[in-house]
Image: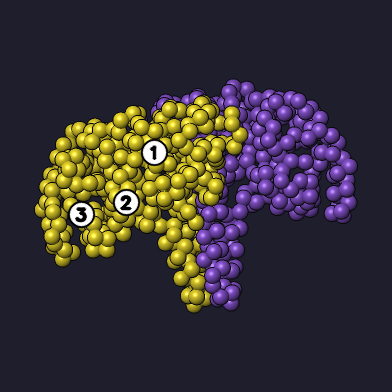
Chain colours: A purple, B yellow
Amino acid sequence: MGGDFAPTETVAGAVMAREELGIEVVLVGDETVIKRELASQKASGFEIIDAPEVIAMGEEGAWAAKAHPRSSLMMGAEYVREGNGQALVSAGNTGAAMAASFLSWGRIRRIKRPAIAVVLPPLDTPKILIDAGANAESRPEHLKQFALMGAAYYRIITGKKDVRVGLLNIGSEEGKGNELTRESYPLLRSERKINFVGNVEGRDITNPDVDVIVTDGFTGNIVLKTIEGTASFITGLILRALGEMDKEKLVPVLPALVKVKDQLDYEEAGGALLLGVRGVCVIAHGGSKARAIKSAIRVAAEAVRGDLPGKIEKLLVKG
Amino acid sequence: MGGDFAPTETVAGAVMAREELGIEVVLVGDETVIKRELASQKASGFEIIDAPEVIAMGEEGAWAAKAHPRSSLMMGAEYVREGNGQALVSAGNTGAAMAASFLSWGRIRRIKRPAIAVVLPPLDTPKILIDAGANAESRPEHLKQFALMGAAYYRIITGKKDVRVGLLNIGSEEGKGNELTRESYPLLRSERKINFVGNVEGRDITNPDVDVIVTDGFTGNIVLKTIEGTASFITGLILRALGEMDKEKLVPVLPALVKVKDQLDYEEAGGALLLGVRGVCVIAHGGSKARAIKSAIRVAAEAVRGDLPGKIEKLLVKG
């Protein structure tokens, strides 16, 4: 029920995921609405969990999840906790999705703070940003755990063993930055389970020499939205410049420009993973259409198959 | 002497500023090197201040400025302090340029922390980001002063009276964010000298409904470099996609793409202004070529003509 285009696009994405990826999807939400939507899309055979309550986009997440135990988010998380499902995917209220997962599943042992990991649009290889917004305030020990979780996730999606972790900062030398980054640097350097490559800067979001970029959730959220804003700004500039041209001159270059647009498209990226909880929760962009929902379901399935929560627990607990 | 392409591009930029903008430029640096450079560019008639010491890009700014009183930055700042020049422009070490201005000129009365203001590349109207990196750590009262200084600067460059100021945050509602932004929000709202429009997010760097975006220097520096990284990433995607095409299909769209490239070019933006010191200091990008240096000199001249330090003092002191 969550997201700007629910239930139409959400249901359509579930149908795509089942048909194209062979993933079984259970729909959680207002049963009447979902049935009507399935009928109008001529789809059938989906299990539906009726969840009569709704959490709005503006509600404070933790409060809303507790106040609405029969919301689609809480009922979906409970369904997973009971072992009926393996992952929760939502395009709804991010804070509420975090709270529902956390309340229902609990944290992985020794994890102090769950964090959101996003895969940045890749030029050649993917790169992960963590925390992209789960925690407005973080401490150095949290950043160390974000680094370990991010590296485990990166290994699962790429197969790479020697994952390189960088600390997002305002200069490359040790000693640069604010109190948080200055104190996190030695902690990260002395953590033998990661390959810490030192500080990285804002422009390193495209640097092939780092795989996982660690930051606090405040900075990470702003970086993510700045990337989005810059990309739409540049797209706007290009559209305006091309719009002033003769249409026939444009035709030959359209395939190349469409390709770039697709590479920039968050609909292919598939949403953010909440790491540190005892289960798989994927938070899709609020503006997700069917293809983005399908991608988010794919990301969830990959995390389940790779046993991401188990791998993170092993890294953190057994080392 | 500062920047990746000094002295060739720095001197060439000074020549361009004099010829194209009619601004008198004094060159501060190693006299022998500058004279040789002027000769090879067939330029003459520049006043030269011999500054035998050099501050490297990696040096800690405040320390370096104090340790090198005969560096081009310190001698340039002193030349301005003595009333011989009206502004300092440098593409060298940012921290050292800040320290040189601060040590030589002092702060404007009541200003607690100078801050760096940059003009973001505009789609329709310019937008200012402040602080873009002068302070790694900030307090709410600093952010309030950044807002006042940013609004004064915006008014000078655009003539706009009712400048709209937003607080960079991770959500639009009051109460969102980290400790700094939560405490800054009511301070900004109650400041009657600015038109505070509330929280803005990372993607609002292109939102036409806000003119000045206020943030701490850590976040601001990362936002600025993220914009730079994203722009070069997208440019890379476009070049790669077009590189795979027949060259003749490309020719008709080249003018439009070159136009976009020019709009994204920081060489036109002209560098960042250090606000809060008793003088005009423009910090150009370290990778500045001649055109960027010329733009930085233009920005400095505009700030001098608009009496930016005087206007800021008036706003802060007299109200």
Q: Is residue A114 shown above or below B166?
A: above
The span from disc 1 to disc 2 (Cα, nearest Å) is 16 Å
In-image side of A193 versus A283 (left or right)? left
Out of A15 and A149, give the one closest to the viewer: A15
Q: Chain of mark 3?
A: B
Kindly indicate the quadrant of the structure image that contains residue A176.
top left
Kindly indicate the quadrant of the structure image that contains residue B8.
bottom left
The span from disc 2 to disc 3 (Cα, nearest Å) is 14 Å
1 or 2: tag closer to the N-terminus: 1
In-image side of B63 versus B314 (left or right)? left
Q: Amino acid at mark 3?
A: Val
**Where the C terminus of chain A falls, by quadrant?**
top right
The span from disc 1 to disc 3 (Cα, nearest Å) is 26 Å
In-image side of A86 versus B173 (left or right)? right
Q: Position of residue A57 (x, y in %)?
A: 70, 37
Categorize mark 3 by other alpha carbons within 10 Å: few (<14), some (14-19), many (20+).
many
Kindly indicate the quadrant of the structure image that contains residue B316.
top left
Out of A98 and B253, give the one closest to the viewer: B253
In-image side of B148 versus A117 (left or right)? left
Q: Which mark is residue B149?
A: 1
Which residue is labeled 3 in the image?
B25
Which element type, helix, strand or loop, lies under badge 1?
A: helix
Q: Chain of mark 1?
A: B
Pointer 2 and pointer 3 on the same chain? yes
Q: Chain of mark 2?
A: B
Q: Is residue A7 shown above or below A240?
A: above
Q: Amino acid at mark 2?
A: Glu
Q: Amino acid at mark 1?
A: Met
Q: Are marks 2 and 3 in contact (CB under 8 Å)?
A: no
2 or 3: tag closer to the N-terminus: 3
Which residue is labeled 2 in the image?
B302
Q: Position of residue A134 (x, y in %)?
A: 59, 32
